[in-house]
Structures are given as structure tokens and as C-alpha cells.
Image (tube, rainbow, N blue to C red):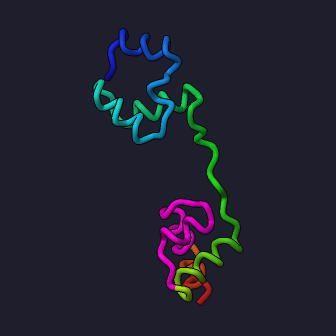
Amino acid sequence: MICRANFEAFCDSRFAEFKGDRRSAIKFGAKVGMSQLEVDTIRRLAGITNQNFRKKLTKEDKEAIYKDYTENKMTYDAIGKKYGVSKVSVFYAVSKVLRDKVRKE
């Protein structure tokens, strides 16, 4: 937890310490005794990040991802870069299509 003086200093600087990429902000937060959650919260409340922006995959995208993974033998990372989503999103897309195929049978 940060002290009041540090928080007031952050406010005065308009949270400039947190405006870079997330990793550098977390490193800075660790130096002053903040957890990752506290850093993320400050970045969200200061308007530095937008938590609502996440690309939504359509059903067709998910099926294409599943095809790329199974037939084209692409990695999660390569597929994620191709569709502009994270590796976790690719994993869930593959899992959902596979689950739907199993339920149909």
C-alpha cells in the first residue's frame, strides 16, 4: 500500500510514472511498494488504459483459429498475432470450438 505523500506526488505529476507500458509501470510500482493490482487500478482510474477495449472474436474467427491450430499447425502466439488477440484468447477460441464439436456428436 502506498502512503498519502506518494499518492499526492503521483497526482501532482499527473501519474506520469505510470504512463509508459504496463511492465515499466509495474516495475516502478514495485520500487515504491505497490502491488500489480494497485498499479493497474491507478492506470485504469487515471485513464491511461482502457479495460473495455478487447477484440471480440466472431464465430467465424473462432472456427478459423481452430482450423489454423489443428490443420495448419500454427502456434498460439502466431495465431494471436494474426488475429490481433492474446494467446489466452486463442486457447479459449480453440477450446470453445472443440467443445461445440464434441457436444454435437
Residue at 34% x, 36% y: name it.
27
Q: Position of residue 100 (x, y in %)?
A: 59, 79
Front one among 1 and 99: 1
Highlighted magenta segment, given as a residue range: 73-95
Is the residue 44 above or below the residue 91 in the image? above
Q: How many marks?
A: 0
Q: In the rendered view, tell whether residue 29 sits above or below residue 102.
A: above
Residue 3 or residue 24, whichever sits in front: 24
Residue 82 within the segment the image draws in magenta: yes
**Residue at 41% of width from left, 15% of height from top?**
7
Mostly what secondary structure, the magenta segment? helix
User: Is the C terminus in the top left, top right, bottom left or bottom right quadrant?
Assistant: bottom right
In the picture, residue 47 is in which quadrant? top right
When the figure is inspected, residue 48 is found, relative to residue 5, above or below; the finding is below
Q: Does residue 10 appear to the left or right of 30 in the view shown? A: right
Q: Is residue 89 above or below residue 59?
A: above
Locate residue 102: give its quadrant: bottom right
Whole-percent x, y for residue 29 in the image: 35, 30
Write the residue at 48% across / 62% down.
88
Residue 28 location (% of width, % of height) = 35, 30
Residue 8 or residue 105, whichever sits in front: 8
Q: Is residue 65 left or right of residue 24?
A: right
Quarter that holds the N terminus:
top left
Residue 17 is one of the magenta-drawn residues = no
The image position of residue 57, as x and y in percent, is 66, 64
Residue drawn at point x = 61 percent, y = 61 percent: 84
